[in-house]
Image: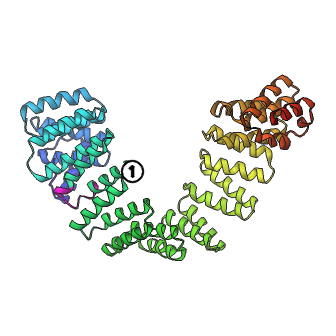
Amino acid sequence: MEFGLPEDNNKISLTRFESMLKTNNVLFFDSSEFENIIHHYLETGKIALAKKAVKLGLEQHPSSINLKLFQTEIFVLEQKFDEADTLLNELHILEPTNEEIYIQKANVLSKQDLHEKAVGILLQALEITDDNEGLADLYALIGMEYLFLDQFDNAKTYFKKCLDIDIEDYSALYNIIYCYDFLEQNENAIDFLNIYLDKNPYCEVAWHQLGRQYFTIKAYDKALAAFDFAIISDDSFVGAYLEKGKVLEKKKLYHEAIENYKITLALDEPTSFALLRIGHCHEKLGNNDLAVQYFYKTVHEDPLLDKGWIAITKFYNKQQNYQKALFYINKAINIDAENVLYWKLYAQINLRLNFLEEAERGFKKTLDLGNYELQTWLSRADVLIALGEYQACIVNLIQAAEFYPETAEIEFRLAGLHFTLHENAKGHYHLKNALLLNCEYEFIMEELFPKVLQKPSVKALISQSKK
């Protein structure tokens, strides 16, 4: 549906319509005015006002096909798919060659995850469409349905048809590259982009995408050349400078990388990504004061960016300034208490500071948030052993064994704990398992349970395993 009212007329129509709603005075609008009013409300997410406009529009223009099509959009938004389908079937009888009816029917099916059927309807619409703009829209919609179906080769085919109609359809271009990326066909993507650039050599978007593909396959010099061409095509293209900076970092050309990141700060509003990367570059160059300044700027720019807080925390960790590291990771946790990376660092820093209760709390929270790495279970176990919380440690290790069965590190710890609690039968059972799995982890007993290692029965078992 096209909307052609001049902007001033459109504003006048909207003002009159909203005035009518406030005063309850019924004013007349022609159908095209209603169409623009409804389109405006749908675009701005004002669904209730769109519904009112559709209702009043159909009262004044009951035979308007376009207004009835808007009614189907409202039905879809309200998930009234049967009502939408019924109305579309009625409209199809009236106007069997109206491609918008097919598009809406496909939309109804797509919203119900019936993507194969949606494709079928859109292919029917292709048969009755002859203008390029209409064909391009249909090709794009078919491509999107194939994306929903994870049929990336089919999706590529239809997005390429969009480019055949309009070589500057950058939405289609991005979707094609997305398909190549998902299929991990980087070389094919490179071939496609080079052919595209032969036809459209000053397309900064294509050069940028080509650079990203070269970066993925670690062809860094070619990536740099591609990003340079993107910048030549558009010297204000922030994305190209950012990507060029990343390549320069990989080549350990940190000064040049900083220059490119700083260009993005001058061209546009500062981004947390650029500030963070500048900080990392300075850190690699040994400019610690500048590095931490940029890490501060990163979290100031975007307090929700976990990489910024992690960078500051790890910076002070490396400096062995654990108190400052703990201060900043606590600030991060206060902002986002559900971030598992924060809690993992919190636990590790508290362990360095020998704050065992807090370290245990951190490891437990890390596990509660779904980080089930073996080392997290073992680190918590070792802290619980140090705290003398043997029963809690056994429960922790049994839970760990559900994720990592037949693991020597777990079995040795369970053996030591049961012997410590004078549960010798259980201790022998787990020690035998541990020695069978990997006797080289015997040092765990020596480090965590030196007294247990002095038991004659334990010595005998270990000696026997070495024969």
Q: Is residue 55 visible?
A: no
Q: Residue furthest top?
A: 425
In this figure, which colouring scheme has been used for the structure?
Answer: rainbow
Question: What residue do we see at 23% from left, 58% from top?
Answer: 169
Q: Position of residue 63 (x, y in %)?
A: 9, 35
Q: Position of residue 343 (x, y in %)?
A: 66, 47
Question: Residue tagged by mark 1?
Answer: 184
| Residue 300 or residue 329, whichever sits in front | 329
Residue 61 versus residue 32 in the image, above or below: above
Residue 169 belongs to magenta span = yes
Q: Quadrant of residue 186?
A: bottom left
Q: Position of residue 449 (x, y in %)?
A: 86, 38
Question: What residue do we see at 25% from left, 47% from top?
Answer: 18
Q: Quadrant of residue 115?
A: top left
* On-image quarter of the C terminus: top right
Q: Position of residue 16 (x, y in %)?
A: 21, 50
Disc 1 packing (10 Å; few <14; some 14–19; many ≥20):
few
Question: What residue do we see at 80% from left, 41% from top?
Answer: 444
Left or right relative to 166: residue 311: right
Kind of residue at disc 1: Glu
Range of residues picked out in magenta:
163-171
Residue 354 belongs to magenta span = no
Left or right relative to 214: residue 84: left
SS at badge 1:
loop
Q: Is residue 40 visible?
A: yes
Question: What residue do we see at 83% from left, 34% from top?
Answer: 416
Q: Quadrant of residue 454?
A: top right
Q: How many marks on residues?
A: 1
Left or right relative to 306: residue 126: left
